[in-house]
Image: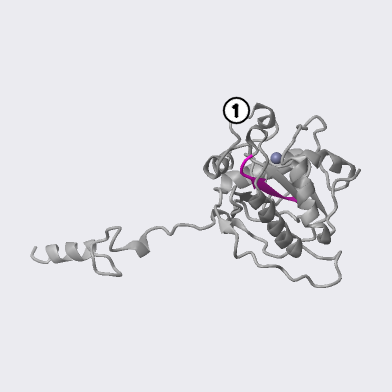
Amino acid sequence: MRLVYPVIMVALLCLSCQQPPTAESCKRFLPKRQKNPAARVVVNKQRPSSKTTQKRKVVLSDRWIKKKWIPFGPKRIQWSLEYLHIHVDEKATSILIDPKVIVVHWTASPDLASSWKLFAPARIPSARRYVRKFGRVNVSAHFLVDTDGTVYRMVPERYLARHVIGLNQVSLGIENVGGVKGKPLHDAQLEANAKLIRYLASKYNIQYLIGHYEYRKLERTPLFREKIKSYRTGKIDPGRGFMKRLRQKLKDLHLQGPPK
Ligand SMILES: [Zn+2]
């Protein structure tokens, strides 16, 4: 019986640090905080092909972009694939995209926190009655630009995000905090959008740059794919003035606007 006490004590000590396994003494055995929950499920890290360009592109740095990932666990992946089946291709097996279009938005929410919370839940809220009828996955976008021009990643670039009817499978979405009561976006956001789009255009074969309000004009292109003809929404974001100024800043990239 005399041996029992020391044996119990040893069992209560942590194997690595020989201390009782409290949160303070044994952090290395606690679950690691995952920086990007979606990173677990990436199966194809290959860059999209660049067959349309002959010369090799120099990809600009993205180290200035901050991270504020929305949860993108198995349910969100499953519902994103379900969205593709309903709207684009019933045989789709992956939610990875090959970006060819950049779509600029505003969140119609006044600050960063409230904007981010719009996109965080995996399931579309019941309040969004119209779009809810066409898929369970919540809306989101790849980037969120704060009013001071800080850019955050919300969704990995090559994941499908639900932000624009007919083009989700080929587009990257940039959300800008603001657009409340028709207030224009800030100059800092204009600069940040331009810098972000330069980075994205250096990495992918981006053909079109559009504001969300212009998405229906791409119905005339083969990029637009939507199986349900009645599924359309009217949009005004991010405002004509913002897109005009943005295109002026980026005219050297020769990105196309919507077909006339
Ligand atoms: Zn939008």
Residue at x-position 83% and y-position 32% = 229
Q: Is residue 90 visible?
A: no
Report the residue marked by disc 1.
Answer: 127
Q: Which residues are magenta?
A: 170-178
Quarter of the N terminus within the rendering: bottom left
Q: Position of residue 10 (x, y in %)?
A: 20, 66
Q: Nearer the viewer, residue 255 or 172?
A: 255
Residue 107 versus residue 143 in the image, above or below: above
Residue 114 versus residue 70 in the image, above or below: above
SS for callout 1: loop
Left or right, 231 with respect to 177, comes to: right
Residue at x-position 77% and y-position 49% = 245
Q: Is residue 20 visible?
A: yes
**The image quarter in which residue 194 lies:** bottom right
Q: Position of residue 138 (x, y in %)?
A: 62, 39
Q: Position of residue 5 (x, y in %)?
A: 12, 63
Majority SS type along the magenta span: strand
Residue at x-position 73% and y-position 61% = 198
Quarter of the C terminus within the rendering: top right
Q: Nearer the viewer, residue 257 or 232?
A: 257
Residue lying at the far right in this picture: please name it.
Answer: 260
Render colour scheme: one colour
Q: Position of residue 256 (x, y in %)?
A: 85, 52
